[in-house]
Structures are given as C-alpha cells and as structure tokens.
Image: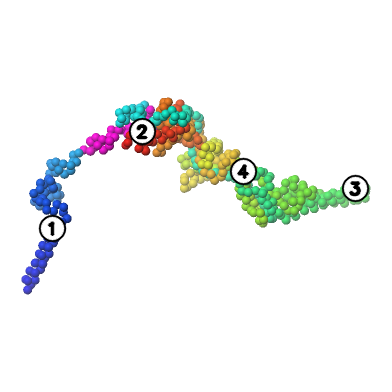
Amino acid sequence: MKKNLASAFVITITMFFIAFVVNTTLFSQTSDPHAGHDHAKAPAAAVDPHAGHDHEKEPAAAADPHAGHGHEKEPAAAVDPHAGHDHEKEPAVAADPHAGHDHSSHANPGIMSVEDLFKPECEHNIKTIDCDECRYELGAVKVSDQAKAMLKTLKISQTQRRNEIAFRGELEYDNQLFRTVANVLPGIVSSITVRNGENVEQGQILAVIESAELSHLALELRKLVAELDLSQKKLAREELLHDKKVGAMQTVQEARASRDLKALEIKCSKERLAMFGLSGKDIDAIAAGRGESTQKGQLKVISPIQGRVVKVHVNIGSAISEQQAILDIVNIKQLRAIGQIKESDISTVITELKTGDINGFITTQAFPGMLYPVKAVSADAGLKSTTRTLGIQLTVKNADELLRPGMFIEGTLEIGQNQQKQILPASAVLEDEGASFVFVKHSDSMYLRRDIGIESRHGDTVVVSGGLEDGTEIVVEGGFLLKSDILRGKMGAGCAH
C-alpha cells in the first residue's frame, strides 16, 4: 500500500513538471517574434554573436557571459555599426551646417580692442565687420544717412569728482521745524479755518475756541483798569488836600499804595492773557474796552510758524480741555533723511564726520531726474541688527517743497579729495544681460558697442569707472536703435546658429 502511494505521488509530480514545460514552450513561441526561426542553422554573427557558444563547458570565468569571448578581436561593426566612429574627430559640419564659424572668437566683443574687431572672418569668407549678415555679432552697426539723423553724440572728458559712498533711506520731518498747536483754555471749538495739507503763514488764524474762562479773564482786566482809574483819581484828590493842609500824609500814602497795587494786578492780568496766546494788540484792546470778541470768550488760535498743516485733531463743536492738541504744523522747506550705509563704509564715514559735515546728493523715484543736496550731520549710536547698516542723519533742502516725508531715497556722500572721473549722461548707457555698454562712433557710418563699468549714478548722470578713453565720441540719444540692430542674432536674424 505504501509503495502504491509513493508511486502515485511521483507520477503526479512528473505530470505537473511536463505540463509546465509544455506551457512555457508554447508561451515562448507565441510571444517571440523569432519563433520558428532555426537559430541553429543561422550564422552566429547574423543573429547572436554568442550562438552555439557552450557556456556550460566554460571555466569559472563563465559567470560573465562575455568572458573569454574575444570581443577585442571581433570587428566592432559586428556589434555596433558606429563602433570605432570617432565623433570628436568628425568635421563639425556633420552636426552643424555652420561648423567652422568660430563664434567664440567674438563671444564678448564689447571688451575686445577695436583692432581685434577687424580681424575675424565670417562663414561668407569676408571680414565679419564688413558682412551685413554677421556684423552684429561684433556689436558693430552700420547706419544709413536717415538713421544717422536720429543719433546725437557727445565727446566725453574727465571732470573733478570726489569718492562717493552710496546709501538708501527715507525722508522724515525735521523735528526742529515741527509744531503741535495745543489749546490753552478749556472750551468749545467754534471754527476751524484750515485743512490737512494747506500752507499757512506765521500768525495766521487756524481756529477759534469759545472759552468761558477767557471771558472771565478779559472782564477781570476791564475791572482792574476801571479800579486803577478810580485809584488814580483818589490819589490826586488826597494829594490836593494834603497840599492845602487839610488832609494827612498817611492818607496820601495809602491812596498811592492802592493805585500801585491795581497797576501791578493789571500787569499780571495782561501777562496771563499773553500766556494764553493773545497778542499785545488784543490785550490793549481789552483794556481799552474794544476787544468785544475776546470779552465774549472767543480765543483765536494762531500759527506759530510758516508751514503746512499735517493733521487736524479736533472738529467744530468739539469740547476740548486745556493742553489738548488742535493741529500739527511743519515747515517742509527743510527735511531730515535717514540714510543707511553698509558696514564696510562705516569707518570712512565716521572718520569724515569727525572733521566736519559731509555733503552729497539724493534722488527719488517720484523725481528721478532731479538731484537734491544733502548734508550728513550725525550718525546713529548703533547698527541695525537685521541689515547690518548704520543710520546717518541728513538734512535735505526742499525749497520747492516737492519732496515729502515718507519718500524712499537713493543717494551718495562725497568723501575725500576731488579726483578726475568720466561723467556720462544716463541716456547714453544701455544694458544687455546685466552688462552696461555705450555705442561709440568709429567712422561716419560705423558705430561700435563698448562695455563700460559703472561707479555710481546721480539722477541723469553716470560716473564711469573704466572702458572709455577721453575724447571718445559716444551716442547719447538714439542708442536704442543701434541696440535693436545688434540684437538681431537673438531673434534669429543674420547667420543662423
């Protein structure tokens, strides 16, 4: 019985193995496009360079299917039709129809010497500078008489200029020219005669406050004036009686003391009214009985300086207390600016400040073509930890009142002695991929691109750090026309790359 079971088990395992082999063979034949192809009869090199190679009889190196196969002796073409084909030694024309056109020779024509610009030849077997299709690669432009009429040139020369330190900052009010007009007596706002932003003159009426306390002070002064008049009359009478030997000297002295006391009280009353903002003229009018509005408690608030109204803090009908702010006024003909200088420039600026003020100029985005003179007067006590910059306090002249606090500024401080520097109009400087350049006149009809270095900018002028010779004639107007011509290559014109 056990032998029969063992035999059955062996037979079952054998049948499963045979079925697996048959299925594998069938699948291989249906999915292989070469099924039915007699590989044994095909030349080994035609289908498989390893066909007929008995790997089982190979030594241990047979772990690598190519070991000992002698590929080094086989023709490379048998495996790769391109084997042995040295692409690096092939003529460039195989991959690029413009092979042999050496663009690297003028990769940066803006810094090449003029002599070198006239040396290279283009693919058309002529000088590149003379080729109408390739000239732009050298930054050269040949202009017509019509285009020439649209250009304006200028010969550059050196001028005296000091070393400069650039900064950025923001405009502020000058706190020495800022005034807050406050109320001096409790009362009610009767009227306001100005609005935010309006220009006011010194002494101009800004508002009117109705104050019961002012009315009381004015009436008290009128009373004291009347009492003084009575005291003077009484003194005159007592002196007359004393002269006639009727009155006593003591009575005269008492009358004189009473008069002097009233005069002192009047003086104190006038000074108190002056402290509340009343002018001497207004006080004299009250004393003479003519200041009717003041006697009714109407206090006129006047401007202490010439300037502009920054803010009105109260409204008509508002009840205000003593020392409450009514308006803010500031004179903006002079402003302050906080310029932030880099940490690397601190030593130079601080040293220069010890010898005196530092002058400079600023520009704003609102008025980019205008330069405003500034003077550095002091430096902050510490650096800003976030930007590692030091604040420099600057005074800014603003006679035309175009500048406004809150504007961002850019500027330079002039340091040291004057030096010879080249100054260009900003309109002459063009840019391409981060490089600054100008066009110089080479001949009556030929203009060349020349790269330059920029030391600093001041409104509509630029200080050049190098790249040009004195006497060079540069294009200051119309340069964009020349730039568009030399950029043709980037838009597919000229010889195609």
Tag nearer the camera, 2 or 3: 2
Tag nearer the camera, 4 or 1: 1
Quadrant into which the N terminus falls: bottom left
Instruction: Measure the C-alpha gap from mark 1 to mark 3.
Output: 159 Å
Q: Residues within 10 Å of mark 2 (few under 14, many from 20)?
A: many
Tag nearer the camera, 2 or 4: 2
Please tell me the numbered disc located at residue 371.
none
Residue 116 appears in view: no
Q: Which residue is mark 1?
A: 25
Tag nearer the camera, 3 or 4: 4
Q: Which residue is mark 3?
A: 240
Q: Is residue 459 magenta?
A: no
What colour-coding does the image apply?
Answer: rainbow
Quadrant into which the C terminus falls: top left
Instruction: Measure the C-alpha gap from mark 2 to mark 3.
Output: 117 Å
Tell me where residue 489 sits by quadrant: top left
Please tell me the numbered disc located at residue 331.
4
Q: Which residue is mark 2?
A: 137
Instruction: Measure the C-alpha gap from mark 2 to mark 1.
Output: 67 Å
What is the three-letter code of the residue carrying label 3?
Leu
Q: Along the polypeptide, which appears first: circle 3 or circle 4?
A: 3
Residue at 12 percent of width and 41 percent of height: 73
Q: Along the polypeptide, which appears first: circle 4 or circle 1?
A: 1
Residue 425 appears in view: yes
Q: List the single residue furthest toward the front.
A: 146
**Tag 1, which secondary structure?**
helix
| Mark 2–mark 3 CB contact (< 8 Å) | no
- Segment colored magenta: 86-114
**Tag 4, which secondary structure?**
loop
Image coordinates for residue 47, horizontal then vertical, percent: 13, 47
Residue closer to the observer: 290 or 316: 316
Q: Residues within 10 Å of mark 3 (few under 14, many from 20)?
A: some
